[in-house]
Amino acid sequence: MEVVLGVGGGIAAYKAALLLRLMKEAGHGVTVVPTDNALRFVGAPTWEALSGRPVRTDTFTDVPEVSHVRLGREADLVVVAPATADLLARTAAGMAPDLLGNVLLTATCPVVLAPAMHTEMWRHPATVANVALLRERGVHVIEPDSGRLTGADSGPGRLPEPARIWAEAQDAAARAGGRAGREAAVTAAEPGAASPLAGRTVVISAGGTREALDPVRFLGNRSSGKQGTALAEAVLAAGARVRFIAGPMSVAPPAGTEVTAVESTQELLEAVLSEAADADVLIMAAAVADFRPAQVATSKIKKTDDGGAPTIVLERTPDVLATAVQTRDAGGPMAPVIVGFAAETGDEHTTPLEYGRAKLARKGCDLLVVNEVGDGKVFGQDATEVTVLSADGAEPVTRTGSKAEAAAAVVEALERVLASREAGGAPGR
Ligand code: CTP
């Protein structure tokens, strides 16, 4: 289809270059129409090189071609990313000071706006009213993400990841029917196009846990958080929103996710029950402590003169994954699709996979990602081997390679589960 990609004058304009690449890779013709301010962030040569087409911002170039009306009329889909507060206001008011304004006034095809701005601007009554008016008129305004903004501030206002914008734009085109809808439906069936995860909310727990012994000491583990981070990146790339629950970890939480930091298993349990209550998928990649000190000293445990050492008595921690499954099975507020992880070693009688199958049945989750551990494998390493076991009887899938490749195997299994539930009418959304 013929797509017009409008680019507003915000720092997130650089992300539109990735969006343009997704559109081109899907085989569409794309004309980029930046505003003058957008060109202060990313220059015309970038847009021309990536789109293979000339770039104009005003209505006085190539006047005989009447591009100020032709582009809008001929487009099958118009996507604006980032849409600044000012651009939303002008669009709501029907103003057309430049070529993009003219395109937006003449387009009869689906129009998708992806806002990006500071939280104060997004929440300003003027912006709220403009967004409501645009939505009333049938414009698809994407909810911005929450997270780090340009300065030190964070909150709602981030431009969503390009994959989510593209997934929502294709959905809008498909809903509109006509040529754009048919073509969007065709690309959606092709690899790399809209995933069943697009537009969903996925909660991922990652990292380890720390169980306090006293105000300064804890029992912890060596989880790096790399697998959970790779998963978040793969899920984001499939067009979903990610709520990332981060236990202590050695890598930074992935950009573009809403991060909740936790420390103990109890905090993790509370975060999972609240974040996953209205989510579509819960992935428990965190390495959770199975035991914690039964007593937490309120002041630092001191050495005694007799040279003795204290005995630490442990108790079991709550099983977060099992609690999530029970909540869901009792009809409570919980993501309908739940994924567990298992670190397994084999012994002379039983293989790691046999242990994994037994754990899948015991835990009651939909997918179990089995990691074979021991000999320094997995924890903190960059390479891994995973086998994804499915409760619905699908063949297990084994993938060896980077944690990104392991994450891709999990995402593929999830997509299969979501697609088959949608086809079977089971609750998946
Ligand atoms: N898990 C959890 N709450 C716990 C312990 C584990 O939610 N208190 C989750 C982990 O996030 C992971 C899965 O359960 O998704 C791992 O299950 P677990 O039974 O702990 O397996 P292992 O750690 O492999 O240990 P074991 O075989 O000893 O049970």
Image: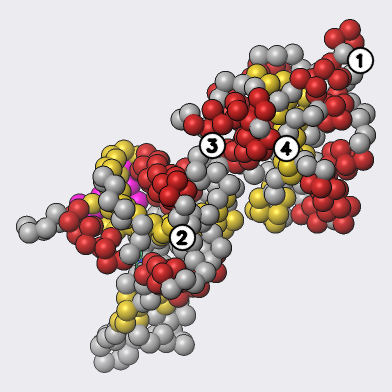
Q: Secondary structure at mark 1?
A: loop
Magenta residues span 373-383
For ligand 1, tell me if the residue under mark 3 lies within 8 Å.
Answer: no
Verify whether residue 147 appears in magenta.
Answer: no
Q: Is residue 204 left or right of residue 397?
A: right
Which residue is found at the position 89% from the left and 18% from the top?
59
Q: Amino acid at mark 2?
A: Pro
| Residue 169 falls in image quadrant | top right
Q: Which residue is mark 1?
A: 60
Q: Amino acid at mark 3?
A: Ala
Q: CA distance from mark 3 to mark 1?
A: 37 Å
Pointer 3 local density, CA inside 10 Å: few below 14, some 14–19, many at least 20: many
Q: Which residue is mark 2?
A: 336
Q: Amino acid at mark 1?
A: Phe
Q: Secondary structure at mark 2?
A: loop
Q: CA distance from mark 2 to mark 4?
A: 29 Å
| Residue 223 falls in image quadrant | bottom left
Q: Can residue 302 be seen here?
A: no
Q: Which residue is mark 3?
A: 194
Q: Which residue is mark 4?
A: 112
Q: Amino acid at mark 4?
A: Val
Q: Is residue 112 left or right of residue 60?
A: left
Work out whether mark 2 precedes mark 3 in sequence or the reverse, and give the earlier one. 3
Which residue is situated farthest in the top direction here?
64
For ligand 1, tell me if the residue under mark 2 lies within 8 Å.
Answer: no
Camera-nearest residue between 413 and 428: 428
Work out whether mark 4 precedes mark 1 in sequence or the reverse, and give the earlier one. 1
